[in-house]
Image: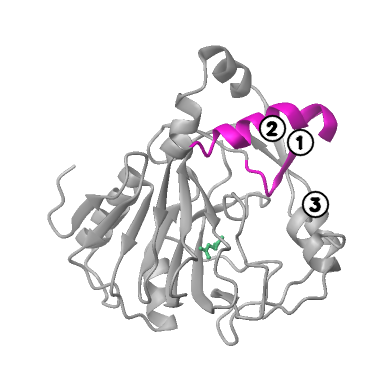
Amino acid sequence: MDYETISVAPIAGGLGAEVGGVDLSRDLPNATIGEIRAALLEHLVIFFRDQHLTPEQHLALGRRFGALQVHDFVEAMAGYPEILEVRKEPEETRNFGGGWHTDVSYLERPSLGSLLYALEVPAYGGDTLFANQYLAYETLSPGMQRMLDGITAIHSARRPYGVNSARAQEYGPSSMRFNFSQKAHDEIEHPVVRTHGETGRKALYVNRTFTIRFKDMTEAESAPLLHYLCDHAVRPEFTCRFRWRANSLAFWDNRAVQHNAVNDYHGQRRVMHRVTIEGERPA
Ligand code: SIN
């Protein structure tokens, strides 16, 4: 696709492009927002360098793409309910978002997309991985595709945010505040293969963090196929890796992408702000 108001340069074969020629702190014309949306649909995750955003500007940018979500289980940044501060301090060992997932897939209406802005990054490490879930679906055999087209999966937030979650049991230092609760044990049904509301393409929609089993099956019965699909979904050729710098912003499409925050920077600080856009019920 040709772009008139922005430059778009792919960074990998599977997905991901760096977008230039735009200052995200400004109230951008509709034509530019339209091209950013088009680049997101074409490349699934887009990256912007050297942006200088206040929390208000970050929120205003997110709102150009839809209503914003408030996280049910992570305390927001003080004074900004729609900003989730993703923080890891030098003395902490756990990170947030480490492990492949799509954001809040345990909700009836999971997020359309997320805009993550880097305030402080480690000297090395702390990259984020992304994986293209159209490719994950399209590279399955026709027989497997036919079978999955009719299957429903159960998603829940109970592994990371349930009352018995590993993080809830742990007493290590944590600069992020979590609301571990019974509500995290709620279950929601989503199709294993979803059709993207804007592109019409089919994407695999299961992830290791929130998908717990297939409908009408036990966890033990579901595990072999679920493990296979979760491994397949993140094959290296479906992925890209983003090396953060302070003032970079990543915008990914949760309808067709999984991501994973690499936890390889113990002893260093990493601080990001995440804004999440409300999506539709997967179909
Ligand atoms: C997230 O899962 O939203 C966090 C990603 C990251 O910190 O790289």
Which image quadrant for residue 181? Answer: bottom right
Q: Are marks 3 and 1 in contact (CB under 8 Å)?
A: no
Look at label 2 and name its amino acid: Leu
Q: Is mark 2 within 8 Å of ligand 1?
A: no
Task: Choose between 67 and 185: the one closer to the eye.
Answer: 185
Q: Nearer the viewer, mark 2 or mark 3?
A: 2
Q: Which residue is mark 2?
A: 226
- Kind of element beneath mark 3: loop
What segment carries the magenta color? 207-235
Q: Secondary structure at mark 2?
A: helix
Residue at 55 percent across and 19 percent down: it is: 145
Mark 1 nearby-residue class (10 Å; few <14, some 14–19, many ≥20): many
Tags 2 and 1 in contact by the CB under 8 Å rule?
A: yes
Q: What residue is shown at x 40% (from left), y 59% (from top)?
A: 251
Residue at image location 30% in from the left, 75% down from the top: 51
**Where the C terminus falls, by quadrant?**
top right
The disc, 3 or 1, on the residue closer to the chain's N-terminal end is 3
Question: What residue would you read off at disc 1?
Answer: 213
Residue located beneath label 3 in the image: 186
